[in-house]
Amino acid sequence: MLTAPSVLAVLKGGATCVGKTVMDEMAYSINGENKHYGTPTNPKAPDRVPGGSSSGSAVAVGAMLVDFSLGSDTGGSVRVPASYCGIFGIRPSHGVVSTTGVIPMAQSFDTVGWFARDPEILNRVGHVLLPFPDVNPVTPNQIIIPEDCFRLLSIPIDRVTQVLVKSVEKLFGSDIVKHVILGDYVEDKVTSLKPFMSKENQTQEYNIPSLAALSTAMRLLQRYEFKNNHGEWVRAVQPDLGPGIRERVWEALGTTDEKIDVCQSLKTEFRSALTDLLGDSGVLVLPTVPGPPPKLQTDPTTLESFRARAFSLLSIAGVSGFCQVSIPLGLYDNLPVAVSLLAKHGSDGFLLNLVQTLYGSIKEQVEVAEKTSY
């Protein structure tokens, strides 16, 4: 039995292993519900899902049982539960933290991330797990707000953007804040998205067509790799899978290699386009998810529009391989709110330092926002 190098690294760095945690079956959900072992209780909203697939890891941190925890993030499995449980979570740059000893879900997107309640501990874990963590604190040269992405939110946009923008302006001035329409930029710069653009994506109100296409491509490659990793076992064992997961697993098993080559070239083209947009020390601000955590045991079909919007946002880091940190922004309507910062591949240390630098100001702005009616 092989112990994952990521686990060995934190143990060697002085961590104590408290235990293993519950997760969604086969890491194939962002809800965090598990019909076999029970669903971990969201400490910030007990009647809501904790988020997945790394649900138990997020809940252990959110409930103050541990200082930090590890989790995997393929399509959002650290970022989503971090957002839902009101804690910090990082999806590191793809390939930067070893995934040896991790059962693969889809290798093109699998990462080992971690959770913490405060940015200092999040950063300290990064100093253990990241190969080049000692980055001098660098002032970002631009903070990019994609206005179209924030229109996907189901809560008032200003409740999220103003907290972040005011914090940035207080520390770095207003000149570095830039506003863009990310969907138009991506559609213009990433021509390999065309095979994934559909009329349905263009007519649905909640979608940004180019980002919906990006999500479609990511999930296609994810299903294809999942099938190659687990299809034989699933067909032989016929496991009893929970609702939503069952349907996704069997859909994955029917995936062919059509368009898979295009998915791979799309990854390269999208990373290049996003690198050009951000430069060396630019940061993209995103809603981590499009709204508050759904209620427990919600019918999966009623969540389709929410999932579609969520994956339009989550696929940006997924396809580019860039690093992303989800930051808690307190409560709106008694439910957790979060925002994410995303930086170019390999900028993990820079991003963690920036989050730690910003968070004192963010906390002040959250206190103001929680007293403001929107």
Image (spheres, helix red, strand yellow):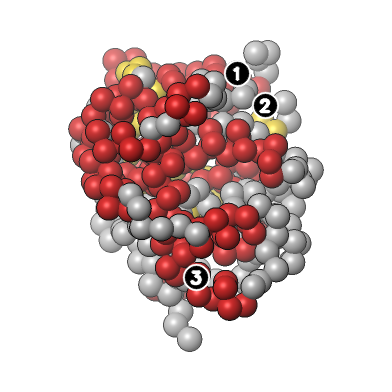
Q: How crowded is mark 2: few (under 14 residues within 10 Å), some or many (20 or more)?
A: some
Disc 1/disc 2 C-alpha distance (Å):
9 Å
Amino acid residing under circle 3: His
Disc 1/disc 3 C-alpha distance (Å):
41 Å
Amino acid residing under circle 1: Pro
Where residue 35 appears, as percent x and y from the top left, is: 75, 61
The kind of secondary structure element at disc 2 is strand
Disc 3/disc 2 C-alpha distance (Å):
40 Å
69 and 103: which one is in front? 103
Q: Do the residues labelled 3 and 2 touch (CB within 8 Å)?
A: no
Furthest residue in direction bottom, as rendered: 1
Pick the quarter of the image with the C terminus.
top right
Q: In this view, does 274 lie above or below 368?
A: below
Question: Who's the residue at 79% across and 43% down the image?
Answer: 47
Amino acid residing under circle 2: Tyr
Q: Looking at the image, is mark 3 or mark 2 earlier in the sequence? A: 3
Observer able to see residue 72: no
- Tell me the residue that label 1 is attached to: 156
Where residue 23 appears, as percent x and y from the top left, is: 62, 61
- Circle on res. 230: 3
Using residue 156 as the reference point, say whether residue 269 is left or right of it: left
- Circle on res. 332: 2
Question: Who's the residue at 28% across and 61% down the image?
Answer: 131
Question: Who's the residue at 58% across and 60% down the image?
Answer: 250
The kind of secondary structure element at disc 3 is helix
Q: Residues within 10 Å of mark 3 (few under 14, many from 20)?
A: some
Q: Looking at the image, is mark 1 or mark 3 earlier in the sequence? A: 1
